[in-house]
Every structure is written in C-alpha cells, then in structure tokens.
Amino acid sequence: MNYTTKIANQVFHHLFINAAGVYCQTVEELEQIQNAPCAGAVITKSATAKERSGNSEPRYFENSVEHNTINSMGLPNLGIDYYLNYVLKHSLKLPTLFSIVGLSQSEIIDNLKKLQASGFSGLTELNLSCPNVSGKPQIAYDFAATREILDNVFAFYSKPLGVKLPPYFDIAHFDQIAAILNDYPLAYVNAINSVGNGLVIDPETDTVVIKPKDGFGGLGGKQIKATALANVRALRQRLHPQIKIIATGGVINGRDVYDHLLCGADLISIGSQLEIEGPTVFARLEKELEEIFADKGITDLRQVRGKLKLIA
Ligand code: SIN
C-alpha cells in the first residue's frame, strides 16, 4: 500500500507517529521512534520555556491487559532549547514535529517566537489541551481564550502549525471549535488529547492509582476509542479540507487504525499502546491494517479515508 501523506511541507511514508508525551522526552527516546519500523514521523515532548520535572510520582498507571492508561505527568520536559537542539543538530530520518506548550499565553508566544526565529522548518504542534497541570484549565475548552491565542500566534508565526485538542462531547462544542479553527491557516489538528480528569481505583487497596491531583488524570487507551473516533469524524465534517487531521486515541490494533481512517484521519498517533508495547507497535499495526485491506480488496487509501458509511 502506498501510505504517502502530505501535511503542509512535510511528506510521510507511513501513517504512524508517537503521541506527544510518549517516547519523546529525551534524545534516546526520540531516536528509538526515528528508527522504529513503519514509523512515519516523530514528535517531541511538549516543550515549555524552561526544563520542568512535572508532577510527583506515581503519575502514570497502565492496565496492559485491558490496554488502558491514566496519567498526570504534568508536562515533564527538558525545555525548548533541548528539543530545538535535537531538531536542528541531529540528522533526522523522519519528519519531526515540534510540540510547544506554555503555562501562560506569554510563554506560548515566547516559545513560538523562538521557533519562528530558528532554522526549524517542520510542523509545529501547539498543545492547547494538557489536563494535568493543577490550576491550569485545558485552554481549548475556553473558546474565547483559544481565539485570542490563535489571533496572537498567527500575527507573527509563519511556519506550518497544528493544534492538539482535548476531546469534545457536545455537538454544539464541535460546531464552535471548528468555526474558530476554520478562521486560521492551520496545517492540521490533532484530536484527541487524553480524556481529562478520570479516576481509577485499585480494588485491592481502595486507593487511587496516581498521586497528583488526588488521583485525577488523563485517560488513554482502548477506553477512549469511541470518543476519539467521534472527535475525528466531527472535526473532519466541519473543518476546511486543507486542515488535515492527526487522529489520536484508542488505537490498539489494525482495526482501530482502519476506523480512524474511515473517520477521516490523515495520520494516526499512538500514545498508550506505544507506552505499553514499545516502538515495535507501528510495524504490528501496519501489518494488521494490510491484512484488513487485503480482505476487503482495498488498494488505495482513498478508498477508506473519510468513507464511513451511515445507516440509510
Ligand atoms: C502531561 O505531560 O501531563 C501529558 C501531556 C498532555 O496531556 O498534554
């Protein structure tokens, strides 16, 4: 199958990318994704202006049998200069996306000014959806703040930019966020970040499984597939066609990839299952997808992408 997919100035030869936050905090982890069979791209950990150690531990819990996770990492990262050094000084095998975050609007703007002034020319992903920093609501749930930030960003930022969105759960919210995003020259949206502020309890001890925020954290894995599919589908129906979609959420097997393609995904990012299984996950997913294509006689991605059927 020819998987060649274009987003802005970047060409991808496989569909898969790590989700920002997973296997991307250090150069060693990033290089594991660069060299993973069937990886199509790499994204760096969402960078703040300065290095952050993140929330207290334990801050990540996985149920590898049920393929579910909860995390409250709190944006641990090595700072924007570390990741800029990586993208500018290393020879990168794959298109490498740069994830940016900020704990205030001015930090976001300063980080993007640094990227604008740098030699980085790939895709930038602005994370508007981290649920794990105490006292800092997920920006993209505040539609006025989202518009204000995008106004200020696009006043100077001229490199291809995407945004990472939180999940939405109401048709009115799909309409409202899409109407805002359509007003800007976005290269893509990434839907969805983890489902924020879930709570998982250990039945043996009756305790929460992560420490930060008294156990509240972002849910990932199989449990969020339906929400992720709905967000990809709803956004694809509403966004201008030139705004591409990276689908994130609930991808455990080839069928999950296929379903995201049906909903209109251009690329697929893997978070929880990458953490659980490691970077060999991409080759397994591609093989399982090829088997589905062979069974259905599909020879071109255009036969699947956005081709979800409805009940007449
Ligand atoms: C985190 O570092 O808390 C996870 C990243 C995110 O959810 O944006």
Image (tube, rainbow, N blue to C red):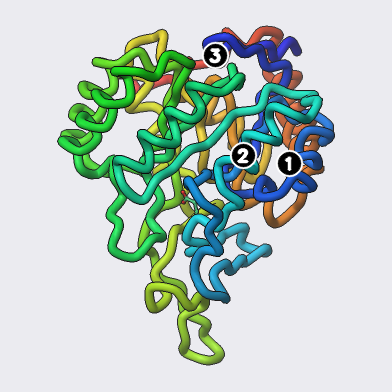
Disc 3: which residue: 7
Question: Pointer 3: residues within 10 angstroms few (<14), some, or many (20+)?
Answer: many
Q: What element carries label 1?
A: helix
Left/right of residue 87 with respect to residue 115 in the rendered view: right
Determine the CA span between mark 3 and mark 1: 21 Å
Of residues 98 and 3, the one nearer the viewer is 98
Mark found first going from the N terminus, 2 or 3: 3
Q: Is 4 located above or below residue 59 in the figure? A: above
Amino acid at dot 3: Ile
Q: Label 2: which residue?
A: 44
- Residue 225, how many percent across, how many down? 49, 45
Residue 270 position (above or below residue 189):
below
Q: Evaluate if marks 1 and 2 touch, with contact meaning CB atoms under 8 Å apart.
A: yes
Neighbourhood count class around disc 1 (C-alpha, 10 Å): few under 14, some 14–19, many 20 upward: many
**In the rendered view of the protein, which quadrant contains the N terminus?**
top right
Mark seen at residue 263: none
N-term-proximal mark, 3 vs 1: 3
Residue 211, compared with residue 257, is above or below; it is below
What residue is rendered at 20% in x and 27% in y?
Answer: 175
The C terminus sits in image quarter: top left
- Dot 2 alpha-carbon crowd within 10 angstroms: few under 14, some 14 to 19, many 20 or more: many
Residue 191 seen in render: no
Residue at the disc numbered 1: 30
